[in-house]
Image: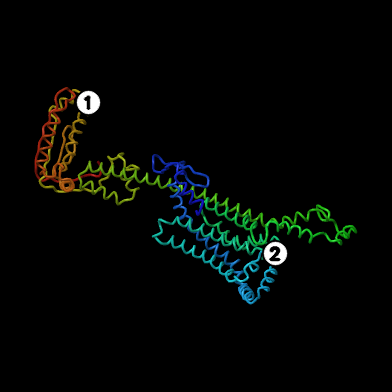
Amino acid sequence: MVFLDVLVNYGCRRWLHKEDYTFDEGEVSSSSKPSQYPLLGFKDRHLEDDYLEYLVVASRARIILGYVTAILLYGSELFASLWVNYDIIIWIGQLYGFMSDEQKEDFKEGRREGTFVKYFPNSTRVFLVIPCLLLLMFILGLVAVVCMYQMKRFEKHRTWIFYITPAIYLLYMAFAGVGFAYDNQGYNDFFGQAGWVIVLIFSHAAPLASLFFISLPALVMFELMIVFVLVFLVIVPLCNPAENLWNLVGEARDSCLIQESVPEYVYAAVEAGLLSPPPDAPPDAGKYEEMDIFRIVSPIILLCVLVVCVLVVSVIVDITNRQSFISKKIIDALTKQREKTLLQQKKEHENLIHSIFPPMVAKDLIRRQSSKSLSKVNSEIGSESFGHKNLGHISIGRSVAQMHQEVTILFTDIVGFTAMSQTVAPQQVMEFLHELFVRFDELVGRDSLLWKVETIGDAFMVASGLEGVRTKSRELAISDPSSIGSSLCPATAAALFGKSALAEARTLTMPNSMQCQIRAGVHTGDVCSGVVGTRM
């Protein structure tokens, strides 16, 4: 996320953003998947930002493990080997300082090409300081990452880790590339002219093995591997003070063939019958050449295989992480939908209870139901949800009785209802009563002091001034002073309702074509309200 990713996420973000995908619209299923670019992430760049925030949290242990691995690998090989030879390196620097100019030139000419002492014999201390700085860089990177995970002030900026980590590795490859360019022939005494490959694998490329553990985005890993190949396999081998390092591989192969040519006594032993010819070929065949070429080239092949493995593993891990992220988003969306549905069903259930029972009874019933588990509630309600099914079996649980003072009760009944109901079909009677009582319900809903008790046949019963209803009316008066009933006494509210009900009834025609007329009776006094029995 240093060069390519900055270009993708900022420079080309506008052109890469092709869709606005959301997991909250409509029905969300497990088959819902946002479209993606190869290596570049989601086409919805906002969703890509969410993914990076998810990935940096999910990869916390892997990133820290990667830093620890890089520190151990670097500290146990190149850094440790330098400090083992610390006294010799310092002594060489001091010795060079006492030499004359002619001696210094002889000293440089006597040093092997591709060794640091040949090019900078008076800067041996710098040769020690640079590895210390590189090791310190990894340690500070680890400290910064741990602090960003632990401190809440960086909670919204944790994706910076995906900028810090690759930047550290790129800086390491830059400094290690410079060091490798001026010191690549140190193992030639052990591995021949191709020893620079061993130096590269076990010294400079060793800390990069920690990339196997760090779960970085695939684009970042692709960038790091490109830089590694360019620096250590192209630029430094072709452009270094010694010579073309790839030519040394061919020279090493030729020298091996010369040194390992078949001695004369082997021919003599074979001709005398004392020794059988080498398997699959005569003693002077090209079998030795193939073996020597493989021995020299195999470290290079191994290095290339490791680079490919890092890329393949990063792509596979990135695909897995994105699938996990999508699954998490789908689960979160389904959970929110489920919670929203349950809350809506619960609200509808409570509204229905309030429309059936007086406020005090309704609140008591809802409070006792909320204190129980969902399974207990379902068993009491007789349904799997808070829907309207089986509400006739709601268990009240206990008798609730309360005295109310100065309550006005109003009854209405229809004139000639009994005679009319005997001359028309029952369905017509029900449709007529429904239309009439719906209008009465609307009148009750306009006044916060009124509460519909029940309907009995053609009778409509309304109470005005119940204790729970008065409390609700006072609360409504405070929040909305203009509401009806906020400044009326219960008796006046009941009388106004009765007057309005008489007017509404006259606008309807009964099924027998007669104009609807109702009677209304009102009385004010003390009443006792309660619920008896355990079922409706």
Q: Is mark 1 on a helix, strand or loop?
A: helix
Mark 2 → mark 1, Cα distance in angstroms: 109 Å
Q: Position of residue 455 (x, y in %)?
A: 18, 36
Task: Give left or right: position of 352 versus 55.
Answer: left
Specify the quadrant of the image occupied by residue 264.
bottom right
Specify the quadrant of the image occupied by residue 440.
top left
Furthest-bottom residue in this view: 98
Q: Which residue lies under the disc numbered 2?
A: 188
Crowd class of label 2 (few under 14; some 14 to 19; many from 20; radius 10 Å) = some
Q: Which residue lies under the disc numbered 1?
A: 428
Q: What element carries label 2?
A: helix
**346 or 188, which lies in front?**
188
Quadrant occupied by the C terminus: top left
Q: Where is residue 160 in the image (x, y as percent from the top left)?
A: 45, 56
Question: Is 50 situated above or below 517?
Answer: below
Furthest-front residue in this view: 101
Question: Is 187 situated above or below 386?
Answer: below
- The residue located at (17%, 32%) in the rendering is 458
Can you see residue 498? yes
Q: Which of marks 2 and 1 is in front?
A: 2
Count every numbered label the image shows and give the total: 2
**Amino acid, disc 1:** Gln
**Amino acid, disc 2:** Asn
Q: Residue 535 carries which label?
A: none
Crowd class of label 1 (few under 14; some 14 to 19; many from 20; radius 10 Å) = some
Can you see residue 62? no
- The residue located at (35%, 46%) in the rendering is 339
